[in-house]
C-alpha cells in the first residue's frame, strides 16, 4: 500500500492523478540543464511536485544581473555557484527529494554519461550550440527532451523524442535544420528579457514533464507552442518530420564526441583567445594594445577605459583603422566580439594576437561591483 504524504494532499485529490500519479513522480529522475531564468522555475516546481530525483547541471555563478528573473537566488548569493545555491534552497523547499548537482558546462565529453542516469532531460540553456548538443545526446540515448526558449517578450516550448499516436517523433533539428546566424539571434544580455517571462515558460516546461510522467492531459509532442507575454496570445504549430535532417545527428558516441557544436553553430574560436573579465583588465593595460568596442553607437553601459569603437555592422569595411598587432574585442555578451575576431583571424591569421571578452561587458560590470 502506498504511503500517504500530506505534502502532496492536493495532488491526491486530483481526478485522474491521485496517489498513482504521485507515485510516478516519486519514481522519476529528471535532469535540468541550466539553472538560470528557465531552470529556476523548472527546478522549484518539479521539486515541490515530488519528483524523486533531480539533477542540476550548470557551471555559472550567481550575478546581480540574474536576480531580475532567476528568483531561486537572492542578493547574498552573488558570487556563489548556482548549483550549490540551488541545491541548498531546493532541499529547504522539499527535503524528501534527492538532488544531484554538477558544476560543469555540458559538452560532448560528459553529456552522454550525465544523461544516461535520468529519465527525462529538460533543456534550459540559452544558446544554439548547447541546444543542438543536448538534442543529439538525447536522440542517441532515446531520452525525452523538454525544450524551452525565451526572447524579450516571447517564449517557446516543445517536447522531443516522444512518439505520437502514430509512432512518429521529432527532435530539435526538425525545428531548426540549420543553425541561425549567431549575429541574427541576440541573447538576453543583448536583447533583454522581461523578468517574468522565463517564469512562465519554465512553468510550461515543468508542466510538460509532469504530464509526460503521469499521463494526464495532452503532451505537446511534435508541436511547438509559442507564447507572447504582451497580449497573452499563444499558438501551436506542427513540427514536420524530416529524415534527412535527423540523419545528420552523430551515429554513435565516438562521432558525437568528435562533433564541434560551437563550430557547427558558427561560433568556433580556433586561433582566437577567449578571456575573462580579470584577464581583460590586465591585458588592456599592455602598451600598443587596441581595445575595440564592436557594439553599436549608444549601447549601454558605457566604459571608463580607452577604446576604439567599430560597430560590427560595418566592421569589415573599417579594418584599416586597426594598426596594432595585439587586439582585444568586446561587446555586450561576447557573441558579436567573437564574430569580429573571426573576421580579423580570416584576414590576418596568427600574424596578430586576437582575443575577445568572453560573455561580454556585462561581466566587466559585475566584477567591478564585487
Image (tube, rainbow, N blue to C red):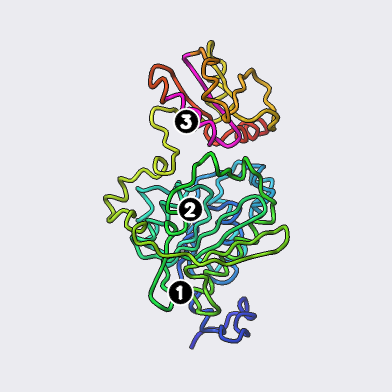
Residue ID at (68%, 22%): 304
The circle on residue 27 is: 1
The circle on residue 212 is: none
Tag 2 near tag 1, CB within 8 Å: no
Among the two numbered marks 3 and 1 on one chain, the one whose residue lies closer to the N terminus:
1
Closest to the observer: 177 or 47?
Answer: 177
Residue picked out by circle 2: 57
Q: Does residue 17 lie above or below 157 as drawn?
A: below
Asked which secondary structure carries label 2, the reply is strand
Tag 3 near tag 1, CB within 8 Å: no
Spatial distance from mark 2 to mark 1, Cα to Cα? 20 Å
Q: Is residue 369 left or right of residue 253?
A: right
Residue ID at (48%, 66%): 53
Q: Is residue 46 left or right of residue 196?
A: left
Residue ID at (49%, 61%): 122
Task: List the single residue furthest toward the front.
Answer: 317
Spatial distance from mark 2 to mark 3, Cα to Cα? 22 Å
Among the two numbered marks 2 and 1 on one chain, the one whose residue lies closer to the N terminus:
1
- Magenta span of residues: 325-345
Closest to the observer: 34 or 168?
Answer: 168
Closest to the observer: 249 or 99?
Answer: 249
Q: Residues within 10 Å of mark 1 (few under 14, many from 20)?
A: few
Q: Residues within 10 Å of mark 3 (few under 14, many from 20)?
A: some
Image x and y of residue 217, in percent: 55, 79
Residue 343 highlighted magenta (yes or no): yes
Residue picked out by circle 3: 274
Q: Quadrant of residue 246?
A: bottom left
Closest to the observer: 328 or 97?
Answer: 328
Residue 24 highlighted magenta (yes or no): no
Amino acid at each position: 500500500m502506498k504511503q500517504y504524504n500530506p505534502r502532496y494532499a492536493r495532488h491526491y485529490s486530483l481526478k485522474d492523478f491521485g496517489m498513482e500519479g504521485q507515485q510516478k513522480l516519486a519514481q522519476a529522475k529528471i535532469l535540468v540543464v541550466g539553472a538560470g531564468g528557465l531552470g529556476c522555475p523548472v527546478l522549484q516546481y518539479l521539486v515541490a511536485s515530488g519528483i524523486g530525483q533531480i539533477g542540476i547541471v550548470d557551471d555559472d555563478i550567481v550575478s546581480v544581473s540574474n536576480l531580475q528573473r532567476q528568483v531561486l537566488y537572492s542578493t547574498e548569493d552573488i558570487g556563489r555557484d548556482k548549483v550549490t545555491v540551488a541545491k541548498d534552497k531546493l532541499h529547504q523547499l522539499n527535503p524528501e527529494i534527492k538532488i544531484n548537482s554538477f558544476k560543469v558546462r555540458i559538452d560532448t565529453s560528459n553529456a552522454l554519461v550525465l544523461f544516461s542516469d535520468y529519465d527525462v532531460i529538460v533543456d534550459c540553456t540559452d544558446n544554439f550550440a548547447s541546444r543542438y548538443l543536448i538534442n543529439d545526446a538525447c536522440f542517441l540515448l532515446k531520452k525525452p527532451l523538454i525544450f524551452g526558449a525565451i526572447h524579450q517578450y516571447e517564449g517557446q516550448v516543445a517536447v522531443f523524442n516522444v512518439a505520437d499516436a502514430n509512432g512518429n517523433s521529432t527532435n530539435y533539428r526538425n525545428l531548426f535544420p540549420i543553425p541561425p546566424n549567431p549575429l541574427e539571434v541576440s541573447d538576453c544580455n543583448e536583447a533583454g528579457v522581461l523578468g517574468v517571462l522565463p517564469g512562465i515558460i519554465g512553468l510550461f516546461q515543468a508542466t510538460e514533464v509532469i504530464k509526460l510522467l503521469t499521463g494526464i492531459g495532452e503532451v505537446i509532442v511534435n508541436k511547438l507552442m509559442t507564447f507572447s507575454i504582451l497580449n497573452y496570445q499563444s499558438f501551436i504549430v506542427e513540427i514536420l518530420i524530416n529524415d534527412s535532417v535527423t540523419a545528420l545527428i552523430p551515429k554513435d558516441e565516438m562521432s558525437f564526441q568528435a562533433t564541434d557544436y560551437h563550430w557547427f553553430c558558427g561560433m568556433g574560436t580556433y586561433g582566437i583567445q577567449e578571456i575573462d573579465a580579470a584577464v581583460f583588465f590586465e591585458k588592456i593595460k599592455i602598451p600598443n594594445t587596441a581595445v575595440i568596442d564592436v557594439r553599436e553607437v549608444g549601447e549601454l553601459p558605457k566604459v571608463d577605459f580607452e577604446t576604439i569603437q567599430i560597430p560590427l555592422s560595418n566592421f569589415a569595411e573599417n579594418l584599416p583603422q586597426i594598426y596594432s598587432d595585439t587586439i582585444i574585442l568586446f561587446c555586450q555578451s561576447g557573441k558579436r566580439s567573437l564574430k569580429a575576431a573571426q573576421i580579423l583571424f580570416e584576414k590576418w591569421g596568427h600574424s596578430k594576437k586576437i582575443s575577445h571578452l568572453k560573455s561580454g561587458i556585462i561581466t566587466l560590470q559585475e566584477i567591478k561591483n564585487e
